[in-house]
Amino acid sequence: MSEAVIEARNVVKVLGHGAGQVEALSGVDLTLRRNELALLMGPSGSGKTTLLSVLGCMLTPTKGTIHIVGRSTAGLGPEDLARIRREHVGFVFQSYHLFPTLTAAENVQMALDLRGQRGKSAKDKARDVLALVGLSHKVSSYPSEMSGGEQQRVALARAIVADPSVILADEPTAALDGKNGQAIMSNLARIAKARGCGVLVVTHDTRLLPFADRIIYIEDGRIVREEQCREPAPLTPRSA
Amino acid sequence: MPLVAILALRNLFHDRLRLIATLIGVVFSIVLVTVQMGLYLGFGRMVTVVIDRASADLWIMTRGGTSFEGPSVLEMRDRERALAVKGVAEVTPVVTAFADWRLPTGALTPVFVVGTVLHTPGLQPWNVKEGQVEALAASGAVAVDRAYFDRLGVSRIGETAEIRQRPVHIVAITDGIRSFTTTPYIFMEIDSARRQTGIPSDKAAYFLVKLDPGADTESVRLELLKLIPKVEVLTSREFAERSRNFWLFSTGAGAALFAGALLGIIVGTVIVAQTLYASTKEHLNEFATLRAIGSSRTYIYTVIVCQAIVSAFIGFAVAALIGLGVVGFTAGSALPIVITGGVMAILFLLTIVMCVGSGIAAIIQVTRVDPASAFTR
């Protein structure tokens, strides 16, 4: 069995204060492994995005523990959590969240810049990863000059360029047509296997089910069911 | 160029209207501060210009004298006592007096008469552009500065006017001898000045003391104070400093200039802070994304500070050009604005500090950004 890249144990997250408090997560246990692409599905308000935020170290759990690549996040401050995010986690957002004043290559390079990787090697790496997602002809284009599918592929390139152990994707195909959505998921699945990272995708889209190694169902802040579709296996060794 | 700087610059220049507003704020502020500081420096020089140009190691004056234009009455017999002190090479008397100048049109204007000895180095008019200093030897001969032609109603050598109802005629015209009090200096030969202003021949306002080469200034000063009662003996530097302090601080003129400069800084800071804050707010989602993908706070602060510094550079460059224009425009006027290299360096640092300080509000805003908001947008 592959190494766990995320381990969440009995995670509780209470949002709000006073009378407006809501328990968004109620004792979630979840493990994500390398080479695995898991889908997190559930109705609106079930706690999917909150769980993604907690697993991505953007929110701290009210109770329970999170380990990212074996490292506990307990007691870490905002800067330490940011360091874990930039060192181990890649994010793909529903609305892409590209920087409009930067080109595709610069957007991808940003993830490396945050890690202190600069200069020609960073530029080359950004271009290579853009080529990997089929955008070698768009390196100098600005987001406004690209389609939604192309923008999401740039966002995907940004998420993977620094070789994270974990990729967290929030409805990555929601704003895309079927063809572009399939293309994004194909890329995600291929990259997860090729690079040996664990990928957790929040989605409502049942058309993505064929890409999943495992499907996790969440309702009212609890994992209610899991389906193992197939045993995750790498396409190539992680070093490739 | 680092990517953080590219992001900062692109965002800054992307919002062109906001950038223009920022630059207007910086330029307005720095031009205002430049003018105020330039006036301060210009006034500072004008206040001491006569003292600085006088050929004197020591000034003897009435105790408590505040400035060159202040009242001072000495006995001429004390000049002999001063000359008797070892180390004193020359003691030149100077008389001064406010008087009325009657223009050829009949109107009156106040002037400040400076009576000087022509045959010894003491206090003679300088920067003579027309005529000769020696011509002041004639009775009623005066030297005036061209900056005050309009005030005095004259513009050429040979023209006449009256001081205290006695006729005077222009024999020399100077350039750049301006008075902080705006009352024009009128240079005359000392005896002529006495006759013109009614100062008795046994009185003088100042004695300008020239020391022998190698003489110890402090020893001479102490000896002069011993021999001559009820006087003060100051070096030129001390007298200049006292005059500057009197005019710029005791009168409140300096405080007004400082207040103007401070106002400029405050207005500039508020404008730049407002525009940087608005710009940051507009890009808050981008900062949240940066934070979400693992950026440190320092990285985000660098973006804001970078924008502030670039605004400062551009704003300062424009303000400096305007400032130099103002300096050139006022150079020949009665109120010249003086800008030195040191002032420019201070203003540049001030601009940087002001702009970076203005970014604090924006930084506070970014500090509160929630990285998880990237998932909910």
Image (cartoon, coloured by chain):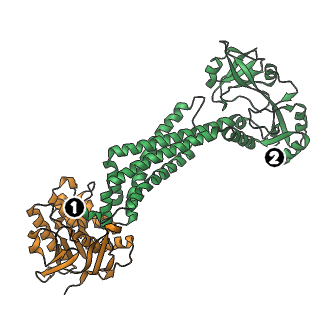
Picture mark count: 2
Amino acid type at mark 1: Tyr
| Circle 2 residues within 10 Å: few <14, some 14–19, many ≥20 | some
Indicate whether B92 appears above or below B85: above
Residue bearing mark 2: B217
Q: Who is closer to the viewer here, B180 or A148?
A: A148
Indicate whether A106 appears above or below B266: below
**Which chain letter goes with mark 2?**
B
- Colour chain B is painted in: green
Element class at badge 2: helix
Residue bearing mark 1: A96
Q: Quadrant of residue A6?
A: bottom left
State left or right for residue B121 relative to residue B172.
Answer: right
Amino acid type at mark 2: Thr
Q: Does any portion of residue B2 appear in the rendered image?
A: no
Quadrant containing the N terminus of chain B is bottom left
The residue shown at (82%, 39%) is: B63
In the image, the chain rendered in orange is: A
Residue A131 position, x and y percent, is 17, 65
- The residue lying furthest to the bottom in this view is A1
Residue A96 position, x and y percent, is 22, 61
**Which chain letter goes with mark 1?**
A
Indicate whether B232 appears above or below B199: below
Disc number lying in front (2 or 1): 1
